[in-house]
Amino acid sequence: MRSGRSPGLSPAWPVQHKDSSLFRSAGVASPRSMPQSIFKRAGEQSSVAGQAQPTTYPDASPQQAASSPRSTQQPQSFDPGYDWEPTVSGLERNADSGAALSGSASTGSTARGSEVLTDTEVIQHAFTDQLAGCLEWREVLLLLQQQSQTMTANCAALALARIAQLARDAREPSTPVGSAEVQSLLARLEASASQLGHKEIARALWALGTMRQPSRKLLGSLCRAAQPLLPRFNSQDLSTSVWALGTLGHNPGPLMQGIALHAAAGVADFQPKGLSMLLWGLAQLRVKPQGPLLAAAAARVQQDMELFGAQALANTMQALSRLDHYSGSLCSAVDQLLATRLPEFPPRELSSLLWVFVHFNHAPSAAFWQTLTAHLLESFKPSELCNIAWSMALLGECQQPLFRFVVESIVKVHISRPLDASSLRQVFQATVIASTMGAAVSLPPQVELSARNSWRSAAAGAPISLSHARVVNRLRSLGLQPQVQVNLGDGLPIVDAMLEQDNGGKLAIQVIGPHDHMRNTGALTGRMTSAQTLMQTLGYSVLVLRIAALPRGPDSLPAQLEFLSALLARHGVTHPVSTDQAAASMPQDFTQQRSSAERPGSEGQATSKGGLRRTRKSLDLPSMSKSSQPDGSDVSDGSWNEW
């Protein structure tokens, strides 16, 4: 069974571009342009709106582990900024209780224009004006020292957001976290999170995400405070909050499903960038929402595609693919758009969309390949050319002249400047697949030897899922002797289990987990479909065994064995041990319940890959590689020959 993570491409996502708006004529602002700030001085130009500002973005090239047979980069977090209101949102009142969201009661009131403000609200207005006067984050720290006695919870949230904003613009987003003042501010927010308004919660989350500050206790307090206020969150509050949680890798459990349901009801209210941020955060946390959100989001993208810039479109499609939600009509619409406007897509976004087509097993139109052949190849980086070659191979397009041209271009680059190891393995697999499928293409002997050695050194043995191990043990209990993790050759897919058929043939069993097929349609992913095609081309019969199809529940072992027996019989395999004998010989603790690692992720943690524990149990399998998260942490990732 494969890892839950999608095969990484060299272009991390969401990708950043100096000017990634695709449809300038539509008047759509660049995704890089930031909205105006609450802290903007009167008559002062915004420091984040419509200008080329020194905004901090994470490194687009996370570390490549030597053990990975190909590039497995994590999605790159992107800074959403925040559409600050021109007035202090902390002055809003709780519709349920009628109490000021600032948390402390006030006995007096003051008129300000047409408003009648409580004393606490006056303090907050004055504090916000002072924050607006701070032009460096260190000035905010001095203000915190002066105002520590009178600061309300909402003021603390605004101060944290202002610090994050100024530190981000100064290209040092994480620097303030080490200061005693910020640590004290975080502790104050943790203690008073229940007093915050919904916008202050969203701003505090944005600040933590911007500063890459995964304070678990504070995040937990903010998420618990957000739960009853969800109906008051607007589309930007939702998208920014989910972006921050995804950036920090904090899964608040049931809150995410509540956010998904609330967002689904207002998909039309999201800006393209906001919708992209929302889906990105869900995909980063591996939260696959229940309900209509993904279908509504796909329909919204298809309806308003011309409002999505290249970056937002690529990010959104990548998120849908990682959430395993396939829309054939949306993919066709993107395909048509690329065929007619491909030169307007930067290479990184184009590479991302090609990977999406691979994951969805969506073959692009001939017009797309013709347009790709005619445009932009001269501007592609070597890693992007490798992505194209790999995508074409898995999509079965390796007979096209474009494929040979791309491979030849890669070889020329490699001779003059050697490719990195992951790109070299990628083009190696592409040519192996192509030659297996009958295409007359190969690498020069010296280049092939280098790529093959790189492949072999990286494919050292990876753990398999607990479900895969259970299937193997059930086959063994039936008296069968399956070969496990059978390597068909360098660059080719690995067979989960191999059995002898009664007629002397070979039966390749592929164990299909939750990330090997689409959640909404059940269709296999492109890499699984390609692996199946290659196995059949090599002369193997293929049995696709979906874990979800196995009977579950207490005392399900006999039913599982009967199910497997019927499948094997249809594929010409008989077993010497009866299902009754096999059931009596197997320990019940293997079947009565799902392990704790198979259950959905708990609060504070993203769900593990595929939601399945990995095991080595006497099975010699490749180890997991690592890649970098947006917050800089390392997470295990599947090797790219896992198909």
Image (cartoon, rainbow, N blue to C red):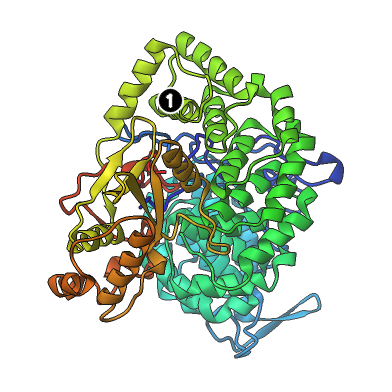
Q: Looking at the image, is 539 positioned above or below residue 635?
A: above
Q: Is residue 82 rendered to the left or right of residue 419?
A: right
Q: Looking at the image, is 220 positioned above or below residue 349?
A: below
Direction left: furthest residue = 585
Q: Is residue 628 rendered to the left or right of residue 233?
A: left
Q: Is residue 607 rendered to the left or right of residue 327?
A: left
Q: Quadrant of the C terminus?
A: top left
Percent across and percent down for residue 371 are: 74, 29
Q: Is mark 1 on a helix, strand or loop?
A: helix
Q: How crowded is mark 1: few (under 14 residues within 10 Å), some or many (20 or more)?
A: many
Tell me the quarter of the picture where residue 638 sits: top left
Which of these two is toward me, 337 or 237? 337
Q: Looking at the image, is 412 positioned above or below residue 37?
A: above
The residue drawn where x is 63% and y is 79% is: 231
The amino acid pointed to by label 1 is Phe
The residue drawn where x is 76% and y is 54% is: 42
Direction top: furthest residue = 416
Q: Does any portion of residue 423 appear in the rendered image? A: yes
Tell me the quarter of the picture where residue 598 sits: bottom left
Residue on which the image places disc 1: 428
Percent across and percent down for residue 587 are: 15, 72
The residue drawn where x is 65% and y is 86% is: 95
